[in-house]
Structures are given as C-alpha cells and as structure tokens.
Amino acid sequence: MKNIKLIVLIIFLLATANSFAQISGKTKRQQKKEIKRQEIEQLVSNQKFTFIPRSLTTSSGFTKDLNFSYELELNQDSTKAYLPFWGKAYIAKINDEGGILFETTADDLEIKNLNKKGYEVRFKAKGKEDTYQIKMEISKQGYTSLFITSNNKSHISYYGYIETIEEK
C-alpha cells in the first residue's frame, strides 16, 4: 500500500512540474512573438526592409516554391527588385532580361496599419520598359504576401517574409 501511495505521489509531482514547464514555455513563446511584432513594426514604420519570397503564384493559379536569393527591397523612397516571373507577357521584347527587375523610386508610397491584421504597403515603381503596381500585406510576425500588377505582364503574387536590409 505504501508503494502505491508513493507512486501516486511521484506521478502527481511530475504532472505538476510538467504543467509549470508548459506555462513557462508558453510565456517564452509569447515573449518571442512580442519581440518579433515590435521588430516588424519598426521595419514597416521606418520603411526599410527586404522582402524574401519563398513561393510564387501566377494569375492562372500555378504555384512554384523558390529557393534562390530573390528579393524586393524598400528603403524609404527607393526600391529595387530581383524577382522571378512566370506567366504571360503581353509585349515580348527581344532582349528582355526576364523576371521583374527594377531599381527606382517608390512613387505614391502608402502604408496602412490594419491593427490586428498587420500592415498594407502600396507603391508604384517604374522599370526600364514597364510600370509596376505593388501591394504588400504584412502580418505582425513578418509573413508577407506581395501582389504585383504590370502593364506588360500578367499579375503575379509571392509569399514570403520581411527582414532587415543586409548591409553589403
């Protein structure tokens, strides 16, 4: 009988210790989320961040995972992009570099705080022979959907995240 009481006591103590560990782990996760939320808020309010795409979706619904170092950088009033493109090109160029490539100013830049949902960033960019309308939906944790509409190509969307601009 003493052994049964001892076993029950040990099980009770282990269960109690495990519940305290779970509370501590939950608190740590909440703290990490809060730190990430503050970091993302700072990046968006300063208008200085890099979008790193991890997948793209064409206008026809084709989805492709990306594993190369593509990016779109917003640095206050300037922007540059090196993004892949899959889809229809309405105007074919002989020496077209392909993809979505530009380095220019971000015209008509608007940033909206969507409260719990995150942020919405919109701007226009002019490439060598095309104009792009860009919309980014950024969550509080940095996950981002990027939508690009072009004059010469079908629209395309990307999914990824934002991070601080790397100094080169």
Image (cartoon, rainbow, N blue to C red):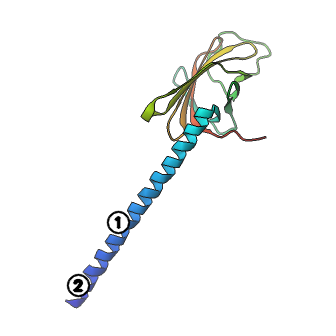
Q: Is residue 78 visible?
A: yes
Q: How far from the left and from the top, in percent, is residue 147?
A: 56, 23
Nearest the camera: 94 or 30? 30
Q: Which amino acid does the dot numbered 1 rest on?
A: Ser
Q: Which mark is residue 19?
A: 1
Quadrant housing the N terminus: bottom left
Q: Position of residue 136 (x, y in %)?
A: 56, 27
Q: Identify whether 96 is placed above or below 121.
A: above
Q: Is residue 129 left or right of residue 155?
A: right
Q: Is residue 65 in sight in this rendering?
A: no
Q: What's the residue type where badge 2 is placed? A: Lys
| Mark 1–mark 2 distance (CA, rounded to whole Å) | 21 Å
- Residue 159 pos. (x, y %): 56, 33
Label 1 or label 2, whichever lies nearer to me, is: 1
Foreground of the two, 87 or 45? 45
Residue shown at 44% from the left, 32% from the top:
115
- Residue at 67% of width from left, 21% of height from top? 106
Image height of 33 relative to 24, above or below: above
Residue pictured at 54% horizontal, 34% vertical:
144
Residue 32 lies, in percent from the top left, at 51, 52
Question: In front here: 60 or 18?
Answer: 18
Query: At numbered mark 2, what does the secondary structure look like: helix, strand or loop?
Result: helix
Q: Which residue is mark 2?
A: 5
Image mark count: 2
Tell whether 57 sits left or right of 167.
left
